[in-house]
Image (cartoon, rainbow, N blue to C red):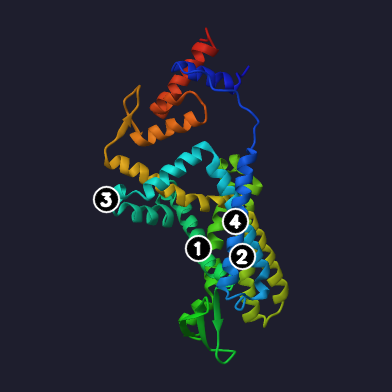
Amino acid sequence: MTEPPEAAAAAAAAATGAPAPPAAGGAGVPLSVTFRATVAGVVVSVLLILAIVFGSRLLENFDSALLPYAVATVFLAFGVAYRYTVWISAPGARRLFRQGWRAFFSVANFRKAPTALPKMIATYLGFQKFLGARSHARWAAHQLIFWGCVLASLITFPLTWGWFTFTSGSGSGPGYEMRIWGFKIIGFDSLNVLGWLMFHGLDIAAVLVIPGACYFLWRRMKDRGAITGQRFAYDLVPLIALIVVSVTGLLLTFSSIFLHGGGYEFLAILHMVSVVFTLIYLPFGKFFHIVQRPAAVGMQLFKYTGLQDQEIFSCRRCEEPIDTGPYVENLRGTMRDLSLDFDEWAEYCPRCKRVLRGSAYLSHVKKGFK
């Protein structure tokens, strides 16, 4: 008969002399957290609406045909602010968040390693080198999705909000002017290379996203490890949504160039629906880590400066290095915040934790077991 997890946890705590952890409860998100998250969502949404109104010169440059996209971005802003507030309200995330941003804005850290922050932003956020250690194929696919989405966002959001406009003095080109907030930035000919890139930026983004998303979709249908823990709504729906958005966007271009606009209206509606769904769904699916990832840069900097100071903490049992001293102390503080009552376990390496848990299980739960 298998022992419940609570018994094993209690036995593991007994191995270090710490009291047993409290029994798991069914408490959800506290009302105060929900209220704060709702207020944050409303404030961010209102600020975005004001930015749209004033950024488009009191809606003078706002394209009413893009209204559904603009409304979706307001819902996106609310969802991101709401979930982000809930996320950093958890004791562990709140402590990491504070330590990360404290390291991020620390003048002392900048003096110690002035180039560390730009390097981490480039390698950790931009090129995600940590993914390359797992799989080069996964890293390449992730890069395709990442840069495709970045390019699409830089084009789509300002256009949707009326911040970007393209105007032609003749009304039909080929000479155009790109304006930001009503101010002329650049003039170009739509028939040259620059003009082609300007008007086909979203097509380029779609070409980048499709192979990356298809790879991850294929992997989640073939890899046993991915299949075991995946959830359809959380893991598969975002990938399918990206593919649908990208394919319908390319079909719009195909229709206008090769079909003389045939089926364009249907494809435009299908594309709009897919984009709106993706934007509203984004805060509640796997892609929310896009919003979380920047906060981790400060935490990486926090660990890096500890290494620079040679504050390495060693395992109490085998004396192998675990991590930086400040990071281990931060972990202990998080465990105290959660009232787990066995924060001493942060002072052991993963291997020794497993050994101590096994020994405690045999000694306290399966006494006499041979």
Which of disc 1 and disc 2 is earlier in sequence? 2
User: Which residue is disc 3 drawn over?
Assistant: 111
Q: Which mark is residue 43?
A: 4
Left or right: residue 112 versus residue 103 is: left
Q: Which mark is residue 49?
A: 2
User: Which residue is disc 1 drawn over?
Assistant: 150
- Under tag 1, what secondary structure? helix
> Whole-Å distance between the Cαs marked 1 and 4?
25 Å
Q: Nearer the viewer, residue 160 or 107?
A: 107
The residue located at (54%, 61%) in the rendering is 211
Kind of residue at disc 2: Ile
**Quarter where residue 320 is shown:** top left
Q: Which mark is residue 369?
A: none
- Under tag 4, what secondary structure? helix
> Whole-Å distance between the Cαs marked 1 and 3?
31 Å
The residue located at (47%, 28%) in the rendering is 336
Q: Position of residue 355 (x, y in %)?
A: 43, 21
- Under tag 3, what secondary structure? helix
Return the residue found at the far top.
368
